[in-house]
Image (spheres, rainbow, N blue to C red):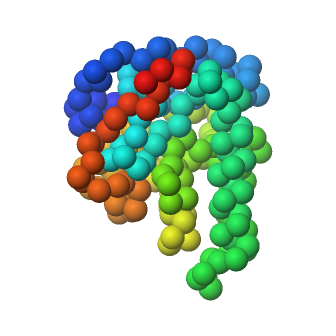
Amino acid sequence: MAVERLGEILGAPSTIPVPVPWEGSAVALNGLLFPADYRWLVDTYGEIRIRFDFGICIPRLDRGGFEAFSDYAADAYEQVELVHEEPRFPETSDRPPYEMFPAPGGLLPWGGDNRGNYVFWLTADPNPDRWPVVVWIQDLEQWDLFPGGTTAFLTAVLIGEYHLGQELLGSEDYPLWESAADWSGRK
């Protein structure tokens, strides 16, 4: 249902992206498989930017393939930890409430923006199709757990049903989405 709804919102892509060889993720990422709705999104649209600012991270050959997700996770967690070390708000704890991938059940980032906001999967469930989305809003120093997967989350953000959605999106003056690249690195 969420896949179809997101497809209606985004519309058809102008080009077909080079498909990702998803079977390689289990080897590269210690058995990790990606959620089916995320694989659909990437195979249909490639790496996209929503309203110019919010980007969907995908495995790309020119960035190290699947292994780049481990690097992306480390970079995201480093930024999050810096905020927790020197918080602006007294209620912000000195440690993030989640471990980061590759820790078992850790957070794996799959998107973010230029302001230090990230969206992650909470990988605790052995079935990736049941991974909820965890959101980090840096300016608010706030974590939020969204109970659905990738496409349900993006749909909720785009139709205004997610309460922190505007923190993630750029101006409505920008196109709804644009292609950034595909598995091969091609735009």
Instruction: Return the residue found at the far bottom.
Output: 90
Q: Residue at x 25, y 24 (%)?
A: 12
Judge whether 79 appears above or below 100 on screen.
Answer: below
* 175 displayed left or right of 163: left
Determine the image quadrant of residue 50: top left
User: Where residue 27 sits: x, y (%)?
Assistant: 74, 19
Q: Residue at x 71, y 63 (%)?
A: 81
Q: Nearer the viewer, residue 133 or 174?
A: 174
Q: Residue at x 51, y 70 (%)?
A: 139
Number of disc labels: 0
Q: Is any atom of residue 66 visible in this view?
A: no
- Position of the C terminus, as image quadrant, is top left
Q: Nearer the viewer, residue 29 or 58?
A: 58
User: Where residue 159 sits: x, y (%)?
Assistant: 25, 50
Determine the image quadrant of residue 88: bottom right
Q: Is any atom of residue 69 visible in this view?
A: yes
Judge whether 46 appears above or below 171 on screen.
Answer: above
Q: Residue at x 54, y 66 (%)?
A: 138
User: Where residue 1 sits: x, y (%)?
Assistant: 30, 32
Q: Nearer the viewer, residue 9 or 156?
A: 9
User: Where residue 7 sits: x, y (%)?
Assistant: 28, 30
